[in-house]
Image: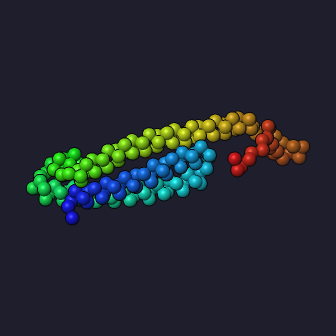
Amino acid sequence: MEIVVVIERILQRELELYQKVYMLEEQKGEAIIRRNGILLEKLSFEQEKVLSEILEVEADREKCIAQYQKEMLNNSSKEITLQEILHYAEGDAAKRIRQLGNSLKELLYKIQALAQTNEKLARDRIEMFALLLKEIKSRLSLRTGYNKDAVEHCSLDNPLVINRTA
């Protein structure tokens, strides 16, 4: 099988996996907004599995490019880029690889932007809860003293009932 066809298949697989990453990143944003930590953790775990698959596919791509370099470029020590492979490829395969490469690049930028947005959402939520906790703690104070039997007695001033499920 021609190496260019193998590279095309690898890029197609990478594109599919990165589309899964994008979908999971969108769902993570929704989980952050809904304050659903359990779902967020589940989605993050799934995303880690997909990223592991991507690492394997990228390793295959590097092997394939090294093989291409060995066979077509007489084992040149210079690292070869996808653009250079396209220069040597002919016809429809080159067009498809170029299109896959462009689609992959575009998707990676979208994933990066979405991940940055989700990170900001998560940080904002954490800051909001930190402020709420600080406010609650500032309203509580411990008052100690001794009762008539000389036993230390503590009580909370301004006690609050806190909903533990919120």
Please state the horizontal and vertical placement of residue 27, each as a whole percent of the image. 53, 49
The residue located at (20%, 48%) in the rendering is 86
Which residue is the extreme one toward the right? 148
Instruction: Give percent across and percent down for residue 84.
Output: 18, 47
> Relative to the observer, which residue lies in front, 80 or 5?
5
Could you tell whether 5 is left or right of 108 in the image? left
Question: Compared to 125, does 40 lie above or below?
Answer: below
Residue drawn 33% across the image and 58% down it: 57
Could you tell whether 66 is left or right of 17 in the image?
Answer: left
56 to the left or right of 116: left
Q: Nearer the viewer, residue 2 or 28?
A: 2
- Can residue 25 be seen by looking at this rendering? yes
The residue depicted at 52 percent of the width and 54 percent of the height is 43
- The answer to whether residue 126 is above or below residue 68 is above
The chosen color scheme is rainbow
Rendered position, 118 above or below 47: above
Of residues 120 and 105, the one drawn nearer to the viewer in this rendering: 105
| For residue 84, side relative to residue 42 (left or right) | left
Residue 11 percent location from the top left of the image: 31, 54
Which quadrant does the N terminus fall into?
A: bottom left
- Point out residue 110 in the picture as x, y percentages from the top left corner: 42, 42
The quadrant in which residue 60 appears is bottom left
